[in-house]
């Protein structure tokens, strides 16, 4: 490719990167390509779910009406089938030529098309055509082929259904709360703290007083919201609001805002900077639970900012018939105001599964979808169908869609009634094998959902959160307060606290860990803690002080890879117990366990059996290390699956060894909420799972409706399979035979 063409390619891809709308991106591309290589037509097609090719944009063809080429038809279809560029001089004479009526393409002869391939799958085709019968020159072919590799990512992101109301697919969203809701849109508005322009203040004390006033006002509003919703709903949602207020009162957040005020910024600017810093911390993490905390921080900042502005409004407020609450960011005050009997669903532009709007919506059993762009948000008065199960939104749908969802809603209400009946029942198999279902958590605000769903304890408490969202290390006393609240919330139940696990994707803003070539294998977990032993001792002291009067404390060591690390940790615990006893604290040595995340730890279990009390398998990291696949890397994520044969056989080895040593085993990570994985692990004899609270009812239902012996038989068959597809197909067939699929 000559330098001129290469520079033109760079110009186009750079210009496209500054455009937010995928549709505008492809329109710019087809126009730019036509000009750059002097062709008469440039068209871009996307493969739909049936592998038909839908025209997204064209320079030169008449695209005033939708153009779709059926699967495998025409020259474009042959490019998809062959996954190879086709360059011919006279298209109409080719035996595969397929004429599209009213497109105007009959006058074009020269034809060159190249596939857009993403992860081995053809997601679209880029076509250029000329009136003159001729082959495209080599430099231009190279240009088109190189550009296609960039286009694959853009085309993959375009949702064909988002621009069509009649194809039955709806707009793809994030599913926030399950259920089906149908009604007209009521739109609420709120301002975002992101819009604040940096402003300074010479009166920091006044700004701090204003912050205190806003916090107090918001606390009062939450109290009012709680009272309002308690009158309107029979369920006990006080715990949800308590959790919200705990988040608001968190001194780590308030202290960070005040730090920026002390630096000379006014209150809105300080809010913006504090919120931005915390969001950056959470969004940099690969843990889905932690990443979702960014939405909670954004909510808190926006709510305080809107109070400062004293703004917020509602359009088309008609609550006399079923309605859907719609807004860029729905918050508690909106839900409180519109939580009457006619609220059937919520549509929020911002939010995630673990954000505040999801927590409240789930508590109230209101179907919710989130993650829509400003352009996708419905207008006031639109009739909507909200699918909170699949994460779909239908704007002004046809009668067939409405009828289908009416039928689905009736079926789902029956299933939810079954889930509700299980809340206070044990997770016991049909052949009477008891299973403990524990929850993962990391913020005080997230304690109540696990309690609400009947969790048997906390399987993973991420103690690094207080470290990550501060501007300095938390003191021992500050940590004691946090840990006490966790232990008190689950009084009489086990709480597994993981020691500080930073490094890799979790960086301390005030203690830079430095740039590492491979942070996943670097200075993280117990390696960091032992090298900063003063921090570890402070944390252990805080945990043990908090545990006085509570018997449930278990301490987890992350990223253990050697006996030396385990011995050093045990010595630290021994010293801390002696220190605190000398100081008059009535402490006892806690149960200590290791997280099996590093594959090398598996073969060392025989050496550790008398040094530990239990094992927790961190299946997310362990699976990644075993498969050498980063599940957050879009280029290889499709190769990650925790029921890969290599993972299953290693897990079976771990669990078999643990049984022989009398060591309890718990499974932590996404495997614990995957029905297929849970069945296979149950077959291995696992009776303790730690998972997100929202997934707990589904997994409890699964466990209560199978025999452990059936799971064991399924496992024996799965261990003979050499690929993921075969294993999942086997498990799917079993669940179908047991009539479980429709209930999960």
Image (cartoon, rainbow, N blue to C red):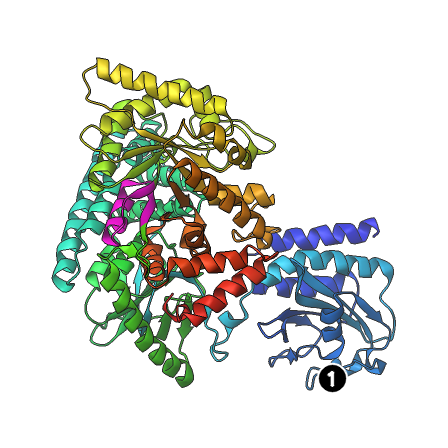
Would residue 251 appear left or right of 509 to someone viewing this image? left
The residue under label 1 is 99
Q: Secondary structure at mark 1?
A: loop
Q: Residues within 10 Å of mark 1 (few under 14, many from 20)?
A: some
Residue 198 in view in this figure: no
Tell me where residue 575 appears, x and y as whole percent.
Answer: 33, 16
Instruction: Tell me if residue 555 comes above or below residue 178 in the rendering.
Output: above
The residue at the point 59 percent across, 34 percent down is 518
Q: Which residues fall within the magenta stretch?
A: 436-459
Residue 264: name its quadrant. Answer: top left
Residue 192 in view in this figure: yes
Would residue 414 appear left or right of 633 to someone viewing this image? left
Number of numbered discs present? 1
Residue 674: name its quadrant. Answer: bottom left
Pick whichever, 173 or 446, lies toward us: 446
Would residue 606 appear left or right of 331 to someone viewing this image? right
Instruction: Find out whether residue 295 is within the magenta segment.
Output: no
The residue at the point 49 percent across, 21 percent down is 564
Tell me where residue 555 appears, x and y as whole percent.
Answer: 34, 31
Pick whichever, 133 or 606, lies toward us: 606
Tell me where residue 82 appears, x and y as whole percent.
Answer: 76, 68
């Amino acid at each position: 490719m000559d330098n001129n063409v290469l520079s033109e390619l760079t110009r186009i891809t750079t210009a496209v990167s500054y455009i937010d709308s995928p549709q505008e991106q492809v329109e710019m591309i087809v126009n730019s390509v036509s000009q750059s290589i002097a062709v008469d037509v440039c068209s871009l097609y996307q493969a739909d779910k049936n592998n038909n090719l839908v025209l997204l944009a064209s320079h030169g063809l008449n695209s005033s009406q939708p153009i779709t080429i059926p699967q495998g038809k025409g020259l474009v279809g042959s490019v998809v089938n062959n996954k190879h560029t086709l360059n011919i001089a006279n298209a109409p004479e080719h035996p595969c030529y397929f004429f599209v009526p009213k497109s105007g393409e009959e006058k074009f002869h020269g034809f060159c098309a190249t596939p857009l391939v993403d992860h081995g799958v053809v997601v679209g085709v880029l076509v250029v055509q000329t009136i003159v019968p001729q082959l495209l020159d080599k430099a231009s072919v190279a240009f088109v082929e190189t550009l296609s590799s960039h286009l694959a990512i853009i085309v993959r992101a375009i949702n064909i259904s988002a621009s069509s109301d009649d194809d039955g697919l709806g707009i793809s969203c994030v599913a926030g709360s399950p259920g089906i809701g149908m009604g007209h849109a009521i739109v609420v508005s709120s301002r975002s703290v992101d819009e604040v322009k940096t402003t300074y203040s010479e009166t920091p004390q006044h700004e701090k007083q204003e912050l205190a006033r806003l916090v107090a006002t918001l606390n009062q509003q939450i109290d009012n919201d709680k009272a309002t919703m308690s009158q309107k709903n029979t369920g006990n949602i006080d715990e949800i609001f308590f959790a919200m207020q705990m988040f608001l009162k968190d001194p780590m957040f308030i202290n960070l805002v005040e730090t920026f005020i002390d630096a000379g910024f006014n209150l809105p600017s300080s809010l913006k900077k504090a919120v931005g810093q915390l969001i950056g911390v959470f969004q940099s993490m690969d843990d889905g639970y932690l990443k979702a905390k960014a939405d909670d921080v954004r909510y808190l900042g926006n709510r305080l900012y809107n109070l400062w502005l004293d703004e917020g409004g509602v359009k088309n407020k008609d609550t006399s018939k079923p309605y859907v609450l719609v807004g860029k960011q729905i918050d508690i005050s909106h839900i409180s105001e519109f939580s009457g009997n006619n609220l059937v669903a919520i549509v929020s532009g911002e939010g995630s599964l673990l954000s505040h709007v999801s927590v409240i919506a789930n508590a109230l059993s209101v179907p919710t979808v989130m993650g829509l762009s400003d352009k996708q948000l419905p207008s006031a008065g639109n009739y909507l169908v909200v699918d909170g199960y699949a994460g779909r939104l239908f704007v002004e749908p046809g009668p067939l869609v409405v009828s289908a969802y009416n039928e689905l809603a009736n079926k789902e209400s029956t299933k939810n009634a079954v889930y509700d009946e299980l809340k206070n029942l044990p997770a016991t198999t049909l052949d009477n094998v008891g299973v403990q279902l524990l929850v993962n958590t990391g913020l005080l605000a997230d304690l109540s959902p696990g309690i609400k769903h009947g969790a048997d304890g906390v399987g993973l408490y991420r103690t690094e959160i207080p470290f990550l969202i501060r501007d300095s290390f938390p003191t021992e006393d500050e940590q004691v307060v946090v840990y006490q609240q966790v232990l008190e919330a689950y009084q009489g139940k086990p709480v597994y606290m993981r020691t500080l696990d930073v490094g890799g994707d979790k960086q301390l803003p005030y203690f830079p860990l430095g740039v590492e070539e491979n942070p996943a294998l670097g200075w993280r977990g117990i390696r960091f803690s032992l090298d900063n032993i003063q921090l570890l001792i402070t944390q252990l002291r805080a945990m043990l002080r908090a545990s006085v009067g509570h018997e449930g404390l278990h301490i987890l060591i992350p990223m253990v890879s050697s006996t030396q690390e385990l011995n050093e940790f045990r010595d630290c615990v021994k010293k801390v117990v002696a220190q605190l006893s000398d100081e008059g604290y009535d402490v006892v040595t806690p149960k200590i366990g290791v997280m099996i995340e590093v594959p090398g730890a598996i073969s060392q279990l025989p050496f550790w059996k008398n040094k530990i009390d239990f094992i927790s398998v961190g299946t997310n990291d362990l699976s990644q290390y075993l498969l050498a696949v980063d599940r957050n890397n879009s280029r290889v994520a499709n190769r990650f699956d925790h029921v890969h044969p290599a993972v299953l056989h290693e897990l079976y080895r771990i669990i078999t060894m643990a049984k022989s040593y009398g060591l309890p085993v718990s499974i932590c990570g996404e495997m614990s909420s995957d029905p297929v994985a849970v069945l296979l692990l149950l077959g291995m004899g696992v009776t303790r799972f730690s998972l997100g609270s929202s997934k707990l009812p589904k997994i409890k239902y699964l466990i209560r409706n199978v025999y452990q012996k059936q799971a064991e038989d399924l496992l024996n068959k799965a261990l003979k399979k050499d690929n993921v597809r075969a294993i999942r197909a086997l498990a799917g067939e079993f669940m179908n035979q047991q009539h479980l699929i429709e209930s999960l």
